[in-house]
Amino acid sequence: MAAPAPPTPPRRLLLPLLLLAVAATWTGATEGGGGAGEYNGVLRRAQRSEFAAWMAGVRAAIHERPELAFQEHETSALVRRELDAIGVAYRYPVASTGVVANVGTGGPPFVALRADMDALPLQEEVEWEHKSKETRKMHACGHDAHTAMLLGAARILNEHRHELQGTVILLFQPGEEVGTGAKKMVNAGAVDNVEAIFAFHVTVMLPTGVVGSRAGPLLAASGFFEAVITGPGGHAAMPHSTVDPVVAASSVVLSLQSLVSREADPFDSQVVTVTRFRGGGAFNVIPDSVTIGGTFRCFSSEGFMRLKRRIEEVIVAQSAVHRCAASVDFSAGGSPLLPPTVNTAALHEHFVAVAAETVGVAGVRGAMEPCMGSEDFAAFSEAVPSSHFYFVGTRNEAVGAVHDAHSPHFFVDDEALPYGAAMHANLAMGYLRRRAAASRGPGDSHDEL
């Protein structure tokens, strides 16, 4: 899917000026073409019985056969079959099992929409007709819904392909749950020349029919650490002849608590949590080593890296106080350090305007509280000049969609699928239309779908 590079000056200098111009047009989005009626019409299209049933069927098929990170072979094949049926071109494989599709002119500007595909190593406990058929594998984070909704957006976009004033890139991403899928897609060139990108996530924090997000930091940077504290152990009856790593590790755990309470800016929310403490196996033996581990989170990249540095300093120094040695590993289990997910202000303004016209003002939460959870979508945010992540509500007590993600009882309300499909399609179409209007200048800003 070759694409010409944007003209000079370099896009990272040009784009902020263009976004300011684009943002100026968003406040008047209901004037002229692309207003509330047409955006809401896209939602009504996705809610038609045939369309909604098709998306629900896609989700059910994916849900029955969940696949873990970078093993999404059947899921990827299903995505490709559906894209073939819709008539949308794609590139495969990308980052092992990923798929990159495109709709539109084939030229700039390029805007991307992303959905993740992988499942969790979890035994499903929801009893329904499409319960997971794979032992200890479950779509407990809604990625089956994300994939179905992006396919729905692909179908809508393809119906409007001759009206698109640019190209929409559709990213079906593997390996989100292990935190490396997005980065691998970036390295594979999936977002080369893309200037804006949107992603969503289903949530029971919001009822079905409601969408939400915020400008600025939305999800935290996150990392894991594992430390091994060593000292020659010995008999518990003669501690004076040993160097006790249990005491050293206990001191380390207590000292780590002060990193947030005494060193962090109160207005820069941070978390350091020790979740693992493993020592010896006998009551009368002081072990030679103790392993501790945990997680740390922060909403700013600067604070995150400072926290990482201080965690290592505290562990090593406190261990030395107790005559022990210590080593710290921030890649324990192969988990990468994830930067924060930060929404571009201009794209958030676009999101609020499009959402109000799609689902109605009452269905928009434009100032959600940030969440200490994390997302590897942040890798796309670092590679693309402008990015936005938002939530699609799926809470519905009537169908049991009340449990948080990563629960064996997690369930998605299929009525939410048309909202995600319509929002993704409208965000992309609206962005390209208003981007074209901004490029033409204020004297020629006719805006039509």
Image (spheres, rainbow, N blue to C red):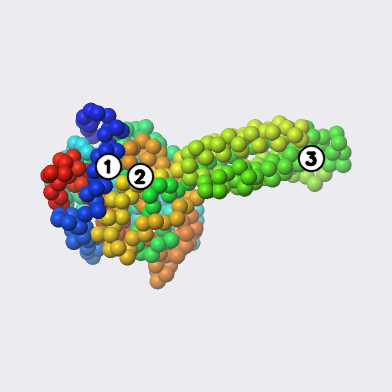
Quadrant hosting residue 172: top left
Q: Which amino acid does label 3 sit on?
A: Ile
Q: Which residue is drawn at 36% across and 57% down?
A: 366
Q: What residue type is labelled 1?
A: Leu
Determine whether 390 is above or below 234 in the image.
below
Mark 2 surroundings within 10 Å by alpha-carbon count, few (fewer than 14), some (14 through 19), many (20 or more): many
Mark-to-mark CA distance, 2 and 1 = 10 Å
Label 2 sits on a secondary structure element that is loop
Q: What residue type is labelled 2?
A: Thr
Q: Where is residue 136 in the image (x, y as percent from the top left)?
A: 49, 52
Q: Which numbered marker is on residue 19?
A: 1
Q: Which of marks 2 and 1 is nearer the N terminus?
A: 1
Mark 1 surroundings within 10 Å by alpha-carbon count, few (fewer than 14), some (14 through 19), many (20 or more): many
Mark-to-mark CA distance, 3 and 2 = 53 Å
Verify CB contact (< 8 Å) between mark 2 and mark 1. yes
Name the foreground residue: 361 vs 25: 25
Name the foreground residue: 98 vs 344: 344
Label 3 sits on a secondary structure element that is strand
Quarter containing the N terminus: top left
Quadrant hosting residue 97: top left
Residue hosting label 3: 286
Is residue 130 visible from the viewing direction of this image? no
Residue hosting label 2: 344
